[in-house]
Image (tube, rainbow, N blue to C red):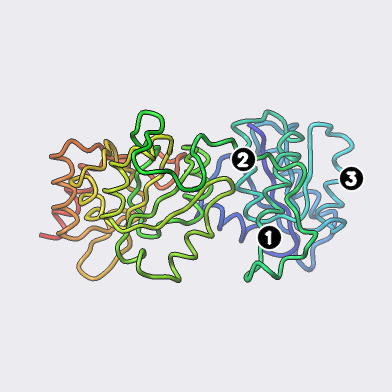
Amino acid sequence: MVGIILASHGDFATGIYSSACMVFGEPDNMIPVTFHNGETPDDLRANLVAAVEQLEDPENVLFLCDLFAGTPYNQIFLLNAAHPGWAAVTGMNLPMIAEALGARDEFETAGEIATAIVGAAREGIVTHPESLMPADAAPAASAPAPAASAEPTGAIPPGTVLGDGKMKYVLARIDSRLLHGQVATAWSKTTQPTRIIVCSDGVAHDDLRKTLIEQAAPPGVKANVVPISKIIEVAKDPRFGATKALLLFETPQDALRAIKGGVDIKELNVGSMAHSLGKVAVNKVLSLGKEDVETFDELKKLGIKFDVRKVPTDSREDMDAIVEKARAELG
């Protein structure tokens, strides 16, 4: 696996490393290195060498730096002459790190990953309103085009049957944060949906949240926000037979309503449930109340399997143990 060093002036590298851990889980083989006031370039070089020595393969390393021609970049440049397997990219941002982490499954060398991530870093720069973007701001030439989707665009006449007439569910997830970084990057890359559907009565009637979610979709993927009654209706519509859907539910109660209404979900990914009054924290990201315990009991009776993971790289947790822990603490 390609090793990754995040290098910056000040605490930027450790800060963005912390952000990456929050969004994607703690990544293997990635280390932040910082350069502070009072340190010399020689100090930084020694710290970079020490960090590289901790990686799986010290000769296959990707350096992500904050500034071109800054001290971190310059020291890496000087060291690079003796290490042809190293590569460096400047302008470090979170989309760049996300792409680099995912690209390690696809590419074997630091150089290949360096080429692959530039487009994602540029596409991560957007303005609101969109009209503020410079006219010449275009996607990077090196950015891979989204995979072609079998899902048609435009209005489809009622009664049309696409594919086998049944929507495919690549992931159904319970997450109180709905569409955020972990979903838009890690889970979307793993499951390859053509459409992300947020199923929530509350959000469907909140124009601001609805707009933010629709804008947060990853490139090449559509995002929609619908009430629970609508996803039940859509699930039975043969016009969506070519759709690979990633469903997001805010609560297990919403998921249960959809399943009982006919949405053919076999497994639920339980990713995040926020703490609130009357709930108990059963791990770092899941808090359950009495209604949640009862809902998971009912889902289990319906034959639903549970995949308890925040991000794809996490190990699966035991949902039965989590529910029993919550039941005991709630009394």
Residue 75 or residue 183, whichever sits in front: 183
Of the numbered discs 2 and 3, the one sitting upstream in the chain is: 3
Q: Nearer the viewer, residue 154 or 236?
A: 154
In the depicted view, which residue is nearer to us: 48 or 116?
116
Q: Nearer the viewer, mark 2 or mark 3?
A: 2
The residue indicated by pointer 3 is 78
Measure the alpha-carbon separation of dots 2 and 1.
18 Å
Q: Is mark 2 in CB contact (under 8 Å) with mark 1?
A: no
Mark 3 closeness class: few <14, some 14–19, many ≥20 residues within 10 Å: few
Type of the residue with mark 1: Ile
Q: Position of residue 57 (x, y in %)?
A: 68, 31
Q: Secondary structure at mark 2?
A: loop
**SS class, disc 1:** loop
Q: Residue at x 49, y 59 (%)?
A: 214
* Of pointers 2 and 1, the one earlier in the residue sequence: 1
Query: In the picture shown, does residue 249 fall above or below 100?
Result: below
* In the depicted structure, whether residue 206 falls above or below residue 53: below
Which label sits in the foreground, 3 or 1?
1
Q: Earlier in the sequence, mark 3 or mark 1?
A: 3
29 vs 135: above or below = above
Q: Are marks 2 and 3 in contact (CB under 8 Å)?
A: no
Q: Amino acid at mark 2?
A: Pro
Report which residue position mark 2 lands on.
Answer: 146
Dot 1 corresponds to which residue? 125
The image quarter in which residue 102 lies: top right
Mark 1 Cα shell of 10 Å, populated few (<14), some (14-19), many (≥20)? few
Quarter of the view holding residue 164: top left
Q: Which marked residue is nearer to the observer: mark 2 or mark 1?
A: 2
